[in-house]
């Protein structure tokens, strides 16, 4: 059993409130540009530390005037934007706890989160979201009010608190302790019921301090970053906090469809992303080259970039490789760097596994991707590759103050100040999540002699798409199996661009279905799975199931199989539970067909 620990380089004050940085920046560097806001004309407006502190204070006073008390939950259901950040810091300054909800969440998902957290106040972005909440408000007795960002929620809070003295905010801030809840982020569980991960001010402070300790060249004043990941995701939220604490200028966008154009316009120094975005940048450049008749040059340049990066780990590139790299730098790599804004030489990747070849390609091009690893329960990254310590294909070494070890069964265990203290109102799940003080990740891993961690598999039944979305298959599978035609379902999509499903048919339901559709009783199942009427019924069942989840969790493509799974066939346990590893192995070609 290998164990590796990195000493801490920071201490956590007992009275820490993660909104403290707002007022520290305003006092020490009031003119520091901490954010850029869209100006409505395709450009950006600077927000200084002093202006941001005024905005946060105004909203915090409004929250207090509205009746938010110490520890009360305030939820945000909105896309990534500047106002999200203002609200988040204001909730902390008012002593509240932010409940983060993805803007793509279904009504059922939002209802459960709001019910379980006993949220008192909700801020949504659009009238459509407000209407969705209206449908479930009768089931939310604790929810007192819902405000809309599109109708001036931030301004409304500022108006409500205008008569209060700023001192009330600082008095409230002082009541917060390091262990006080700062945010609830709900993560999928194997039963389909999301669990509320309670992250404290101490957790968030430790993540920020550790990130800044290992990324001093990227997280410092004068650097710029364009944040596009959902702020409801712990990865974006935690690293964004570290960037703010370090004095990085951050801009926000929720439009993923034009990211390359936005990179070119904003010119970030580093970006925070999930692997899928890097895949799109690479695939887009490759397709453009091939369409333009320069595919051969691009492919050779890609091979050279990978070889160059690999050589950096093995004594350095030789003269011939250096010359080839220099030629392709002028022909290809420079254009790729320009496509990412021209200033970006570093990126952080999380939320899912990064293909090692892709990592080598980008480092060879001149944009090093620092892959990290973490979960909602670890306040995002607990390990990361850095400029000083990098090994592509691993997720790096533990952050300062943190340790990792591999249990006898291969499960990766973690401990340190970023590890959460428990699930909201769920003592049983909390107890099950720890073993002798170590957090059980549910992932299988290995740790080498230098402390670099490699994730080798997944012990738990949570899928993580290439876009970094956590998806619990159980709810989708249970819903689909309610259809009479369907016998078994296995949802797939781990490290894939979207969610798919393998579906088997119920042999007992087929005779009646064939009769109702005037088909011969001896119609073979190989013909049935291609029958338009049967496929339409299965598609309708999938569509109904997809209403239970967000778009990112929805099943996009299915494959109906001609054989059912059984205990005798080895796919099911005696309890009729799926043996996922067996199905993945035996039906690998069918899974591959979904994504081909």
Image (spheres, rainbow, N blue to C red):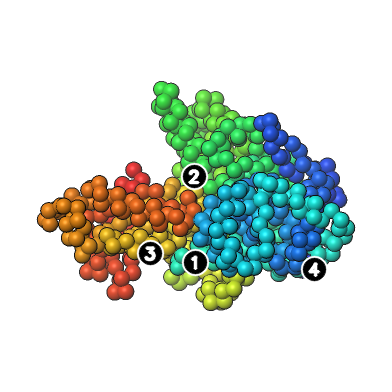
Q: Residue furthest top?
A: 293
Left or right? Give the position of 279 relative to 49: left
Camera-nearest residue between 245 and 298: 245
Residue 231 in sight in this render: no
The residue pinned by badge 1 equals 193
Residue at horizontal 38%, vertical 62%?
479
The residue pinned by badge 2 equals 276
Task: Compute the Cα span from label 2 to label 4.
Answer: 42 Å
The answer to which of marks 1 and 4 sits earlier in the sequence is: 4
The answer to which of marks 1 and 2 sits earlier in the sequence is: 1
Left or right? Give the position of 44 relative to 228: right
Q: Are marks 1 and 2 in contact (CB under 8 Å)?
A: no
The residue pinned by badge 3 equals 478
Camera-nearest residue between 394 and 57: 57
The answer to which of marks 4 and 3 sits earlier in the sequence is: 4
Residue 28 in sight in this render: yes
Instruction: Tell me, for residue 175, which label it has, or none.
Output: 4
The answer to which of marks 1 and 3 sits earlier in the sequence is: 1
- Locate residue 55, reporting x and y percent: 79, 49
The answer to which of marks 3 and 2 sits earlier in the sequence is: 2
Task: Compute the Cα span from label 3 to label 2.
Answer: 28 Å
Q: Secondary structure at mark 1?
A: loop
């Amino acid at each position: 059993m290998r164990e590796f620990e990195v000493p801490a380089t920071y201490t956590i004050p007992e009275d820490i409130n993660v909104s403290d940085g707002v007022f520290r920046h305003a006092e020490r560097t009031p003119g520091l540009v901490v954010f850029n806001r869209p100006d409505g004309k395709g450009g950006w407006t600077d927000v200084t530390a002093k202006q941001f502190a005024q905005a946060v204070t105004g909203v915090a006073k409004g929250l207090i005037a509205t009746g938010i008390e110490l520890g009360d939950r305030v939820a945000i259901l909105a896309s990534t934007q500047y106002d999200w950040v203002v609200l988040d810091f204001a909730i902390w300054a008012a002593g509240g706890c932010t409940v983060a909800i993805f803007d793509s969440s279904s009504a059922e998902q939002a209802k459960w989160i709001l019910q379980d957290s006993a949220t008192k106040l909700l801020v949504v972005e659009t009238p459509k979201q407000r209407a969705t909440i209206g449908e479930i408000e009768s089931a939310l007795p604790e929810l007192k009010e819902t405000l809309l960002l599109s109708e001036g929620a931030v301004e409304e809070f500022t108006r409500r608190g205008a008569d209060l003295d700023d001192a009330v905010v600082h008095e409230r801030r002082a009541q917060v302790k390091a262990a006080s809840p700062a945010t609830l982020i709900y993560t999928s569980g194997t039963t389909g019921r999301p669990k509320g991960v309670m992250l404290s001010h101490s957790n968030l402070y430790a993540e920020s301090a550790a990130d800044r300790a290992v990324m001093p060249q990227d997280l410092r004043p004068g650097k710029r970053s364009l944040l596009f990941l959902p702020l409801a995701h712990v990865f974006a939220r935690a690293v964004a906090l570290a960037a703010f604490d370090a004095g990085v200028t951050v801009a926000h966008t929720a439009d993923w469809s034009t990211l390359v154009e936005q990179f070119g316009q904003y010119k970030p120094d580093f970006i925070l992303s999930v692997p899928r975005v890097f895949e799109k940048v690479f695939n887009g450049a490759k397709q453009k080259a091939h369409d333009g008749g320069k595919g051969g040059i691009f492919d050779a340049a890609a091979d050279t970039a990978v070889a160059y990066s690999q050589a950096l780990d093995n004594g350095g590139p030789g003269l011939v490789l250096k010359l080839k790299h220099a030629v392709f730098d002028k022909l290809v790599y420079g254009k790729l760097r320009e496509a990412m804004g021209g200033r970006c030489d570093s990126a952080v990747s999380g939320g899912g596994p990064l293909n090692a070849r892709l990592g080598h390609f980008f480092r060879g091009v001149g944009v090093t991707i620092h892959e990290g690893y973490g979960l909602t329960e670890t306040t995002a990254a607990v390990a990361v590759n850095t400029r000083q310590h990098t090994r592509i294909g691993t997720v790096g070494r533990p952050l300062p103050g943190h340790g990792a070890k591999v249990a006898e069964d291969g499960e990766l265990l973690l401990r340190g100040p970023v590890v959460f203290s428990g699930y909201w109102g769920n003592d049983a799940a909390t107890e099950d999540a720890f073993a002798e003080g170590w957090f059980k990740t549910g992932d299988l891993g290995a740790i080498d002699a230098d402390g670099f961690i490699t994730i080798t598999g997944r012990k738990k039944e949570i899928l993580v798409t290439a876009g970094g979305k956590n998806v619990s298959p159980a709810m989708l599978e249970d819903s689909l199996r309610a259809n009479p035609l369907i016998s078994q379902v296995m949802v797939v999509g781990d490290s894939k661009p979207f969610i798919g499903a393998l579906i088997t048919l119920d042999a007992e339901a087929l005779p009646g279905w064939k009769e109702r559709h005037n088909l011969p009783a001896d119609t073979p199942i190989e013909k049935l799975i291609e029958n338009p009427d049967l496929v339409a019924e299965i598609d309708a069942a999938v569509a109904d199931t997809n209403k239970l989840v967000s778009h990112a969790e929805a099943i996009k493509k299915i494959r109906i199989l001609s054989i059912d799974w059984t205990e005798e066939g080895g796919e099911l346990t005696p309890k009729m539970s799926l043996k996922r590893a067996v199905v993945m192995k035996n039906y690998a070609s069918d899974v591959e067909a979904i994504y081909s």
